[in-house]
Image: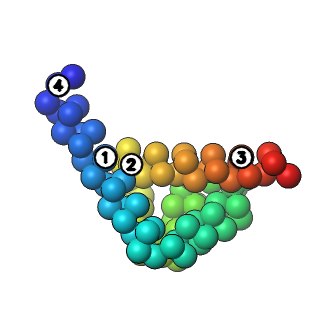
Amino acid sequence: MSITEIKNKERVINELMSFIRKVLVEPEISKIATDIAREHLNDENARVVIAEALSAATNIKIPLEHSEADELFLDVLIDVIKDEQALY
């Protein structure tokens, strides 16, 4: 693994840690995020729509150009909602 790859992974981990801190400090973010994901899961470009809605509704800001950490978060969020819907 090159130094660049290691630095990139370190940046992703740091970004995810920052996000987790925000959610732990403001637990309502989790409910808002899952509500937004439920509402827009089947939209065209759902990931973009979810990211924009989450950025507008919370202090979680996901830029138009998603980082690897942003993509991981959106993947997990969408997976949680899909799992939830599969249970019902």
Query: Please, what is the three-letter code of the amino acid marked with disc 1?
Result: Val
Left or right of 64? Residue 87 is right
Q: Earlier in the sequence, mark 2 or mark 3?
A: 2
Left or right of 25? Residue 38 is right
Q: Earlier in the sequence, mark 2 or mark 1?
A: 1
Disc 2 to disc 3, C-alpha distance: 21 Å
Element carrying mark 4: loop
Query: Pointer 4: what residue?
Result: 2
Residue at 68%, 53% in the rendered image = 81
Asked if labels 4 and 3 touch by Cβ distance under 8 angstroms, the answer is no
* Closer to viewer: mark 2 or mark 3: 3
Element carrying mark 1: helix
Residue at 63%, 46% in the rendered image = 79
Total number of numbered discs in the rendering: 4
Q: Residue furthest left?
A: 3
Q: Earlier in the sequence, mark 1 or mark 3?
A: 1
Question: Residue 61: x and y, percent?
Answer: 40, 67
Query: Please, what is the three-letter code of the amino acid marked with disc 2?
Result: Ala
Query: Pointer 2: what residue?
Result: 69
Query: Please, what is the three-letter code of the amino acid marked with disc 3?
Result: Asp
Query: Pointer 3: what residue?
Result: 83
